[in-house]
Image (cartoon, rainbow, N blue to C red):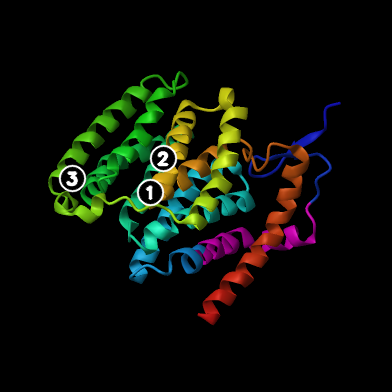
């Protein structure tokens, strides 16, 4: 028997019996979704990235997570789910950011996720930032070809709804490749052996990798037919690459979050009952993360 449904203000399909409780009604009046998400980024800054050498590096890494958020939010339509995906991605990126100071490339990879998910979601002008992104990324890191592969994978997705759009992306990708070649020519890492060093994750971060990679792999198998081609290709590529270096682990965190947001957490959760429960829970979460972040800030 089909369950009766309704659509909320942000497009979530919920059970028809869903009713906002007092916490949600109060939260909406106080715009707690903005306060709560601001608290999420403060939490990520303090817990995951505050160990960077300078506060500006912590800010850049947190900006990378913000770009990831912009790439995820139209898929999950749920601040609770999006927040926990960002927590996982930031935790996976922590050693690359705070130990290797791989900050600027991490932020730029977040911009790649923002641009390409916008390309899929009718925010197509974002792709025009890519040549500048790759010029800087190629100057900053020898791993730019992996980010380039991440972007190029979106060419595999047919865009019959908008004739000429894939051709436009192909031109932007080509321009990005040329910009990366120029960036590589001037790159300081060309003569720096440390930039090429492979830093293997420790046992804790391998365990954290497994905790994210196993659900990602299961979702790739279960939802393969319904996934866009770039999500399939990037999901497989970065899941396989993740355990082979701290920088690769950071990139996997973002790619894995996109796969989860596009599958089991699409529109919050792939279950009407759970989706309604998550919708209630997110309004409580905003208060909890606000109190937690303020507590962390005060006790530092």
- The stretch drawn in magenta includes residue 42: yes
- Measure how far apart labels 2 and 1 are at the Cα level: 8 Å
Residue displayed at 52% across by 76% down: 297
Q: Which of the two residues, 67 or 53, is positioned nearer the viewer here?
A: 53
Element at label 3: helix
Q: Nearer the viewer, mark 2 or mark 3?
A: 2
Residue at the (45%, 18%) spot, across then down: 160
Q: Please say whether residue 181 is one of the residues in the magenta stretch.
A: no
In whole angstroms, how far apart are the C-alphas of marks 2 and 3?
Answer: 24 Å
Q: CA distance from mark 3 to mark 1?
A: 23 Å
The residue stretch that appears in magenta: 20-43
Q: Nearer the viewer, mark 3 or mark 1?
A: 1
Place of residue 16 in the rendered image (x, y in percent of width and height, measured from the top left): 81, 39
Badges 2 and 1: C-beta atoms under 8 Å apart? yes
Above or below, comparing residue 217 to residue 35 in the picture: above
Which residue does the numbered mark 3 point to in the structure image?
183
Identity of the residue furthest to the right in this view: 1
Whole-percent x, y for residue 288 in the image:
66, 66
Among the two numbered marks 2 and 3 on one chain, the one whose residue lies closer to the N terminus: 3
Count of numbered circles in the view: 3
Give the residue at x 73% y 58%.
Answer: 24
Disc assigned to residue 241: 2
Q: Is residue 128 left or right of residue 269?
A: left
Q: Earlier in the sequence, mark 3 or mark 1?
A: 3
**Residue at mark 1:** 245
Q: Secondary structure at mark 2?
A: helix
């Amino acid at each position: 028997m089909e369950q009766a449904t309704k659509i909320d203000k942000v497009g979530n399909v919920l059970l028809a019996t869903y009713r906002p409780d007092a916490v949600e009604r109060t939260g909406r009046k106080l715009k707690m979704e903005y306060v709560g998400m601001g608290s999420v980024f403060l939490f990520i800054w303090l817990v995951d990235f505050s160990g960077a050498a300078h506060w500006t590096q912590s800010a850049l890494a947190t900006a990378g997570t913000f770009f990831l958020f912009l790439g995820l939010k139209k898929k999950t339509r749920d601040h609770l789910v999006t927040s926990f995906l960002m927590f996982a991605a930031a935790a996976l990126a922590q050693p690359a950011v705070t130990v290797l100071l791989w900050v600027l490339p991490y932020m730029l990879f977040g911009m790649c996720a923002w641009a390409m998910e916008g390309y899929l979601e009718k925010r197509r002008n974002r792709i025009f930032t890519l040549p500048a992104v790759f010029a800087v990324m190629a100057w900053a890191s020898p791993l730019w070809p992996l980010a380039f592969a991440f972007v190029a994978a979106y060419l595999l997705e047919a865009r019959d709804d908008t004739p000429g759009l894939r051709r436009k992306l192909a031109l932007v990708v080509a321009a990005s490749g040329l910009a990366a070649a120029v960036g590589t020519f001037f790159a300081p890492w060309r003569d720096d052996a440390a930039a090429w060093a492979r830093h293997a994750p420790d046992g804790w971060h391998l365990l954290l990798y497994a905790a994210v990679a196993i659900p990602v792999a299961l979702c790739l198998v279960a939802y393969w037919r319904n996934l866009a081609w770039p999500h399939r290709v990037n999901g497989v590529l970065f899941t396989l690459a993740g355990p082979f270096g701290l920088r690769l682990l950071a990139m996997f965190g973002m790619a894995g979050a996109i796969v989860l947001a596009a599958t089991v957490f699409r529109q919050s959760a792939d279950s009407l009952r759970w989706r309604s429960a998550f919708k209630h829970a997110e309004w409580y979460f905003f208060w909890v993360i606000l109190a937690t972040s303020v507590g962390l800030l005060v006790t530092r």
